[in-house]
Amino acid sequence: MKKVLIANRGEIALRILRTARELGVKTVVVHSEADAESLPVLLADEAICIGPPSPAESYLNIPNILSAAIVSGADAIHPGYGFLAENAAFAEMVADHGIAFIGPTPENMKLLGDKATARKIAREAGVPVVPGTDELASVEEAKEAAQEIGYPVILKASAGGGGRGMRVVHTEEELERAVLQAQEEARAAFGNPAVYIEKYIEEPKHVEVQVIGDGKKVLHLFERDCSIQRRHQKLLEEAPSLLPDEVRKGLLQSAVRLAEHVGYVSAGTLEFLVDREGNYYFIEMNTRIQVEHPVTEMITGLDLIRMQFLVAGGEPLKLRQKDVEQRGHAIEVRINAEDPEKNFRPAIGQIETLHWPGGPGVRVDSHLYAGYKVPPYYDSLLGKLIVWDEDRPRAIQRMRRALFETVLEGPGLRTTIPFHKKVLDNAFFRRGAVYTNFVARRMGGD
Ligand code: ADP
């Protein structure tokens, strides 16, 4: 591999660029008109504008991205996360042009990309899933299933993602309307109206397993706890989880079994919910690098993007499971341009004053610089602050220290930093009493 085209923006484009440069691979960063002054564009060997600000016309514009790859002579494309990362048709087209797609195979994506299909595959592989249904054919079927499963239930879109398209239903009276609304929402948001039902698990932990495969074998790189969420979207992640050893072992083995079942290639994440009794249930697989991958890198010392590059270049994984070791504890906080006081409403502006923390065990993944104007067209992630230390209490102290040093100010700008400071001071968080309803129950949010 000599030249990679990075089909993404923001912090993840920068993250990929950093590893590519260390590998001696040249970088082409494609960008929208709104991102012409962004850091990955400024640092790239080559930059190509692929369209106007709206994602549909730029970061999702397959003809323009492929043309950019051909014109620049790129022999690989890394899609990052979001945008085209989990689009099997795109991965197929990339391969058809003789370009390596740095990610899973189109077949992997087809089998696991649709949540209802992924549930079937998990059952086939003997991995527990949340009690529930396949895609619903009718409201009648929904009623019967919900009765059998027991309320509350959660309606989910098969094509869903990003915490959207989910609806909790407490009684049969609410069900019919909820199904029709959920189908309509799913059609509007994802172009696919299919929905299914799962039992609603009360106060679970969200624990996910990082895996990497080369088509022959799959390794797990341990797990992350991502229970601190607002509106089903992650805000703070840590590794390892605080699960008892036997539960953790079962979870890691299940993840590997499922990924091996489909001959998984590249980095991927299997998400599970774990209930109060320690039962774990697979909910979905993300067939891409994830925002929270750095916490895994911090406890294992591995570079996941580098591993993705090597696997995509056809190198089998040299590492064996027993060589993968974990050390200490890592925490990541997502710094979003959102106002936590106003229900996490986007609060974007220009970055006037910027100071990132440093010192031992501190990592910053961010595309910001002083004077940078955050464009309003994309997600609100400004960067990620990640810390590592010997154990969880020390990692918490280190994160508090790092956040104390961080200054991120500008007109109109609000960030999630004050929220994270409160979480770190919260007695329940410190005890490890973290569940997906933590923000609602302990922080007065939703
Ligand atoms: P998305 O793909 O939109 O992120 P997920 O299926 O990964 O959706 O679920 C996101 C979050 O929604 C979970 O981390 C959890 O907080 C909540 N959730 C999903 N399914 C259930 C369930 N069956 N019971 C309780 N909470 C759930």
Image: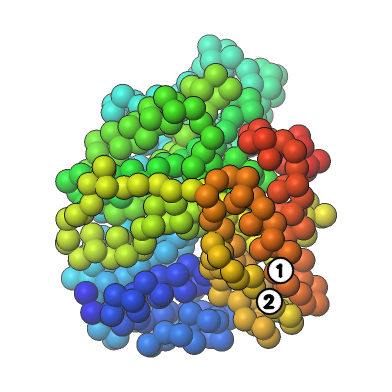
Q: Residue at x 49, y 53 (%)?
A: 295
From the image, which quarter does the C terminus lie in? top right
Q: Position of residue 390 (x, y in %)?
A: 52, 50
Name the element at disc 1.
Answer: helix
Q: Is mark 2 within 8 Å of ligand 1?
A: no
Q: Is residue 366 above or below residue 338?
A: below
Is tag 1's residue or tag 2's residue first in the polypeptide sequence?
Answer: 2
Check the image and report above or below for 178 versus 5: above
In the displayed structure image, the side of residue 122 where residue 163 appears, left or right? right
**What amino acid is at disc 1?**
Glu
Front of the two marks 1 and 2: 1
Identify the residue at horizontal 24%, vertical 64% (top origin).
310
Residue 274: image location, x then y, percent: 52, 28
Front residue of 390 and 366: 390
Residue at 36%, 58% (x, y): give it: 302
Is residue 365 left or right of 172 when viewed as pictured? left
Contact between marks 1 and 2 (CB within 8 A): the answer is yes
Q: Which residue is mark 2?
A: 355
Residue 294 image offset from top left, x and y in percent: 47, 58
User: Residue 353 is drawn in which quadrant?
Assistant: bottom right
The residue closer to the viewer here, 66 or 228, is 228
The tally of labels here is 2
Q: Is residue 180 above or below residue 83?
A: above
User: Where does ligand 1 appear, by image quarter?
Assistant: top right
Disc 2 residue type (three-letter): His
Residue 263: image quadrant is top left
- Distance between mark 1 and mark 2 Cα atoms: 7 Å
The quadrant where residue 401 appears: bottom right
- Coloured how? rainbow
Q: Which residue is mark 1?
A: 405
